[in-house]
Image (tube, helix red, strand yellow):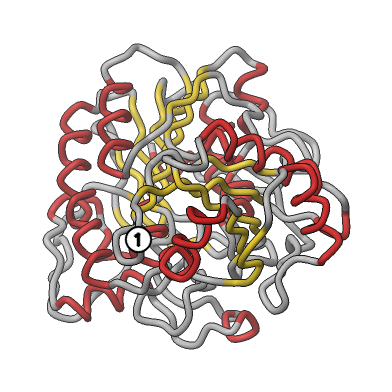
Amino acid sequence: MERYRRIFLIVLDSLGIGAMPDSKSYGDMDVDTFGHIAQRVGTLNIPNLKKIGMLNLHPVPGMEAEEKPLGRYMRMAEASHSKDTMTGHWEMMGLKVEKPFKTFTEHGFPPELIAQLEKRCKKKVIGNKSASGTQILDELGEEEIRDGSMIVYTSADSVLQICGNEETFDLKNLYRCCEIARELTMKEEWMVGRVIARPYVGKKKGEFVRTSNRRDYAVKPFGKTVLNALKEKGLDVIAVGKINDIFSGEGITRALHSDSSVHGMEQTRQISDRDFHGLCFTNLVDFDALWGHRRNPEGYASEIEKFDLELGKLMEKLRKEDLLILTADHGNDPTYKGTDHTREYVPFLAYSPSMKKTGPMEESDTFAAIGATVADNFQVKMPRGTIGVSRLAEIL
């Protein structure tokens, strides 16, 4: 019998909780996104995360855990061989990625790809290297505006990113160029997980600011996910933030674009006022994009506290037949070297006003425990080729 009528799954993008055993092979030593942020700032004002059990799951020196937490909690390890956004989300919904997406971090994109991109977009490409989004704007933004060129860059992730000043490289044209890049990078030798439009405003170095009109063009999942199974059964699958982009619309019944993580939580709260039946899947990207990659632990800490305030408002609205699950898709320790994601365990925090069992659960060896649990709740069969074991019986 269906236990929960509505499930709210919220991804705190990049909020890892400690290095996985194989993290060294990914270049990550002693990383811990949540723990190191808390240690850097001294303490975090997170009463609602604390109530659910975050500090019981991941103790932090100087911060007291909840004596009687309201939720169920466990660590989850990533089974896929990667530490990127798409892989993490796809695994949550049952797909294990065996072969990581291609990266072009060391030398940039091949000349043949760049030549085709320039020809079809009718713009000269500048950049073509791995860089921080804010740094490359300071370096090349004025040149792009002056010459009508196009900044193309990558990172340690499997991405091709194109910057465009909204005043001189209009959004419609930027999106068109990204669609061309997506088409070109479907070739096996050039295939990246995502092409990302990175619009910005400003006229000179030091004043450039990226806007919320970002758009992701991801490859489609290589198989059906739990989202497809839910949609095929006639259930609601509401995507908030970049979820729709990550899954290329596969299995989504309604999509909402978010301007920020706070906006994403406001949208989720508004959705909670509706009598939908199924899953509300929310990604809060600012943790990762604004603070993790920019190695700003203080900004990240402030974002966590803002989220906690919004979390409290959402918890007040939850009904007895609702289930809330909080998690992350990878780590991005802002105290660590570089600007890349970090290979970490992620939290699983579950809460419902009707929940009878609380406290710790045995660790999961895959993020796919989430999708399997959602499918089990709605009595939906897991698609062929997916992984994951339901933990529903433990969170009733």
Q: Which residue is mark 1?
A: 204
The front one of 379 and 248 is 248
Q: Please indicate whether residue 215 sits to the left or right of residue 126 in the image.
A: left
Position above or below: 167 against 81: above
Quadrant of the image occupied by residue 297? bottom left
Q: Please indicate whether residue 269 sits to the left or right of residue 305 in the image.
A: right
Number of marks present in the image shown: 1
Q: Amino acid at mark 1?
A: Lys
Q: Please indicate whether residue 94 sits to the left or right of residue 69 in the image.
A: right
Residue 363 in sight: no
Q: Please indicate whether residue 17 sits to the left or right of residue 114 in the image.
A: left
Image spot of residue 76 (x, y percent): 50, 61
Position above or below: 349 against 374: below
Quadrant of the image occupied by residue 365? bottom right
Residue at left 32%, top 69%?
34
Residue at left 33%, top 27%?
322
The front one of 384 and 158 is 158
Give neighbour class at mark 1: few <14, some 14-19, many 20+ (Cα, 10 Å).
some
The front one of 296 and 106 is 106
Position above or below: 155 against 122: below
Image spot of residue 13 (x, y percent): 42, 54
Image spot of residue 341 (x, y percent): 51, 69
